[in-house]
Image (tube, grey):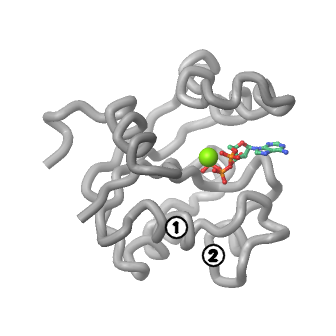
């Protein structure tokens, strides 16, 4: 089985959608094997999203990710990385397929409710960014 790092973003925690989003993961066969609610500083958000440092939306993205609490979680399942991205839907909610998290809950391309790792190497890196070995069983 595979593991991936998921973040329920500030727009979603603010609207009390954590449970509804977690239900989408569980209904897709993903198991939440670690989870915690934290409030990132803008510097920490910038470190997490360092790959986007040169993108024009970097400032907006890191400010948003630090604007309220997030729920960071590890999802486990067969093909968890691809399955999670399928359940999330396209980055821009206007392009997201019906029934996906972003189609149902996201407000805009910036405030799009969830993050999910995009490959095995980034999943590994992102999981260890937020969770210690002791927190992962
Ligand atoms: P994530 O990495 O959050 O799972 P993603 O892989 O679908 O999303 P990326 O291209 O990695 O999308 O972009 C990372 C995040 O940056 C997006 O989720 C979104 O919040 C933000 N973002 C991407 N494009 C834009 C944009 N044009 N304007 C504002 N924010 C954007
Ligand atoms: Mg991405």
Marks counted in the figure total: 2
Q: Kindly identify which numbered label has been placed on residue 79.
A: none
- The picture quadrant where one finds residue 114 is bottom right
Q: Position of residue 82 (x, y in %)?
A: 48, 66
Q: Nearer the viewer, residue 44 or 3?
A: 3
Name the quarter where the N terminus is drawn. bottom left
Q: Kindly identify which numbered label has been placed on residue 21.
A: 1
Crowding near pointer 2: few (<14 within 10 Å), some, many (20+)?
Answer: some
Which is in the foreground here, disc 2 or disc 1? 2
- The picture quadrant where one finds residue 121 is top left
Q: Classify mark 2: helix, strand or loop.
A: loop
- Check mark 1 vs ligand 1: CB closer than 8 Å? yes or no: no
Question: Upstream in the sequence, badge 2 or badge 1?
Answer: 1
Q: Is residue 40 left or right of residue 93?
A: left
Q: Classify mark 1: helix, strand or loop.
A: helix
Q: Position of residue 24 (x, y in %)?
A: 49, 75
Q: Is residue 108 left or right of residue 118?
A: right
Q: Is residue 85 left or right of residue 111?
A: left
- What residue occupies the far top of the structure in this picture? 43
In this rendering, is residue 108 above or below 64?
A: below
Q: Kindly identify which numbered label has been placed on residue 100.
A: 2
Q: Nearer the viewer, residue 63 or 133?
A: 133
Crowding near pointer 1: few (<14 within 10 Å), some, many (20+)?
Answer: many
Q: Position of residue 73 (x, y in %)?
A: 38, 49
Q: Nearer the viewer, residue 76 or 81?
A: 81
Q: Residue at x 43, y 60 (%)?
A: 81
Q: Residue at x 79, y 60 (%)?
A: 92
Q: Residue at x 38, y 53 (%)?
A: 4
Q: Label 2 to label 1, Cα distance in Å?
A: 10 Å
């Amino acid at each position: 089985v595979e593991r991936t790092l998921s973040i329920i973003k500030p727009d979603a925690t603010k609207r009390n959608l954590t449970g509804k989003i977690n239900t989408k993961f569980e209904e897709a066969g993903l198991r939440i094997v670690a989870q915690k609610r934290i409030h990132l500083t803008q510097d920490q958000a910038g470190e997490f999203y360092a790959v986007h440092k040169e993108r024009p939306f970097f400032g907006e993205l890191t400010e948003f990710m630090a604007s309220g609490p997030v729920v960071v979680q590890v999802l486990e399942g067969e093909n968890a990385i691809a399955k999670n991205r399928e359940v999330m839907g396209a980055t821009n909610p206007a392009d997201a397929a019906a029934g996906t998290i972003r189609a149902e809950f996201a407000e805009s391309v910036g405030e799009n409710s969830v993050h999910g790792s995009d490959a095995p190497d980034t999943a590994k890196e992102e999981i260890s960014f937020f969770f210690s070995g002791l927190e992962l069983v």
